[in-house]
Image: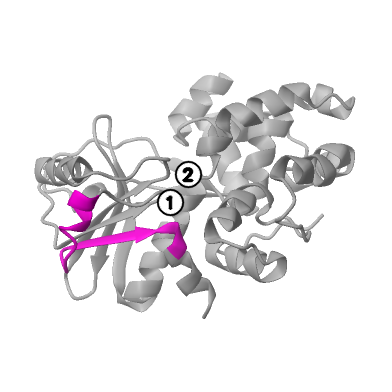
Amino acid sequence: MTIDHRPILAQYKRFCETNSPKTQQIALEYFAVFGGLDIDIDTQVPIYELIQKHILKKYKSLRYDINRLIHDEAMSSSILTALALGDRRTNSAFKHTKVSFDHGIKIVDELCDIGVLKLEKSLQKFSGIEDQYTVSEKLIFTSPFVRFWFAFVSPIFKGIRDGDFDEFRTRYDNRKSVWSSFIFEQLCFEYMRYTIGGKNIRQAGRYWDDDISIDMLIETKDGKTIAGSCKYTNSKIKKSELTLLKEKCKKLSIDVDVYVFFSKKGFTTELKSLRSEELKLFTVKNFIQMISV
């Protein structure tokens, strides 16, 4: 098994070129499971059938490869599962696995060194509030497949190893509607880099503290500040989401030039009527532009 650790957009482009999904929605859903795994799949086949064929029934060989990847460390596996199922914060993962911070950080550093994870820090310097306390860092899986493995396969490996997939099916069915949301958010960043031009971005990331989170903050080299929200839900985004984002930025003393919203299902008529140079609206369909170049 070969795991692709290239940047997420490179992985996504390869996935779309190789597997020819009919829509970007299908591409995103299947990529969130198989992205980074060096196999070709038929995206017209129901996703559970593909998971069963390419992952569950090949559990033993894949587990061998995964264990080799993480040097067969049990604590590494536990931390990766906590990250895959949790809020991605280091402190939360260490608390869940009952490991000390110092030991946990050592393991995380090793996983970053071998390319399984990469560290993400809150863009607190965007905020005008003085004396900001330091919040827990977050971690990003470099491979969607590895994230999927530690969320759904590794925690219940005994049943899967023995050919019983019922528990897996229940767990996956309970989470599949939101599973693609973080991959969606990552690709939203890539789309902004594509539209703005990566060389024209000074910094880009997310903001979080104990009370407020903002999905996207971007500062361009010409001094513009962009704040964004990424909603992977089956509801259209309403004007109230714009109001909420503006309130968050105001509370953090962030002067925003452009607001951007990314949606799985689109926007209400009221919000679309406000579209302007200061308000940009995108859906998953827009992703086709950045993989066509």
Q: Which residue is mark 2?
A: 181
Query: x%, y% of residue 60?
Result: 88, 38
Answer with left or right where residue 289 lies relative to residue 280.
Answer: right
65 versus 79 height, above or below = below
Query: x%, y% of residue 106?
Result: 56, 38
Callout 2 touching callout 1 (CB < 8 Å): yes
Q: Which residues are magenta?
A: 269-285
Q: Decide whether residue 277 is among the magenta residues.
A: yes
Residue closest to the far front: 269
Q: Which residue is mark 1?
A: 185
Residue at 78% x, 37% y is: 72
Residue 118 can be seen, yes or no: yes
Answer with left or right where residue 5 lies relative to residue 283.
Answer: right
Give the amino acid type for the residue marked by disc 2 in the picture. Ser
Q: Quadrant of the N terminus?
A: bottom right
Q: Decide whether residue 176 is among the magenta residues.
A: no
Answer with left or right where residue 211 lies relative to residue 180.
Answer: left
Answer with left or right where residue 87 lies relative to residue 6.
Answer: left
